[in-house]
Image: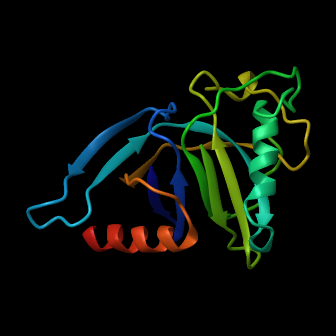
Amino acid sequence: LNHQRRTNNIMGSVFGKETVAEPAYDVLLQRSAGHGVETSYEIRKYGERFAAEVEYSEDEGTGDPFRALARYIGVFGTPENEGNQAISMTAPVVMEKSPTKIAMTAPVVMEKSNEKEGEKTMKFILPKEFDDMSKIPKPTNPDVHIEEIPAQLGVVHRFSGSMSETTNREKSAELASQL
């Protein structure tokens, strides 16, 4: 799953496996390849949801933030959150530019920061049962923060294969040319 979105000039990518739970959404428009459409896509409306996130430098790569988020939900053993509550892995993982730093609050997303050159944010979208800040276990790692994500529209193009910066740019350009 590769998802591109533009909000206040923010572009990001979302990736995940089709067999993993996704946040609820409504399909507003669906276009299949063929008959003048080169890249298939859907326009989706997502409701409010929550994500665990870690900010990192573009120079660091994605390994450390991914592992910090994976430890928060308990992928590598005891979850690193208050109550040691295991949390199911969901898709998407989101990577995007970080519009602003957030205060500590209760997928994976990666964003480039508008504040600092080379800064990004990676987010794991939390499962639907975590629909209120009071239900979300607080991270014990100070690098992990919880963010409320408002309802929004997203354009989605699904494809098979590995996700890399090069693939992300290519798929983004293909998708953007259709919109």
> Is any atom of residue 97 visible in this view?
no
74 to the left or right of 42: right
178 to the left or right of 58: left
- Where residue 24 appears, as percent x and y from the top left, is 44, 32
The residue at the far front in this view is 161
- Where residue 48 appears, as percent x and y from the top left, is 53, 37
Residue at 53%, 53% in the rendered image: 14
Of the pair 114 and 20, the residue shown nearer to us: 20
68 to the left or right of 159: right
The residue at the far left in this view is 35
Residue at 41%, 50% in the rendered image: 153
- Is 177 located above or below residue 64 in the figure? below
Image color mode: rainbow
Quadrant in the rendering for residue 177:
bottom left
Q: How many numbered marks appear?
A: 0
The quadrant the C terminus occupies is bottom left
Of the pair 92 and 11, the residue shown nearer to us: 92
> Is any atom of residue 35 visible in this view?
yes
- Where residue 150 appears, as percent x and y from the top left, is 55, 44
Quadrant in the rendering for residue 138:
top right
Residue at 80%, 68% in the rendered image: 60
- Where residue 163 appears, as percent x and y from the top left, is 53, 60
Residue at 19%, 53% in the rendered image: 32
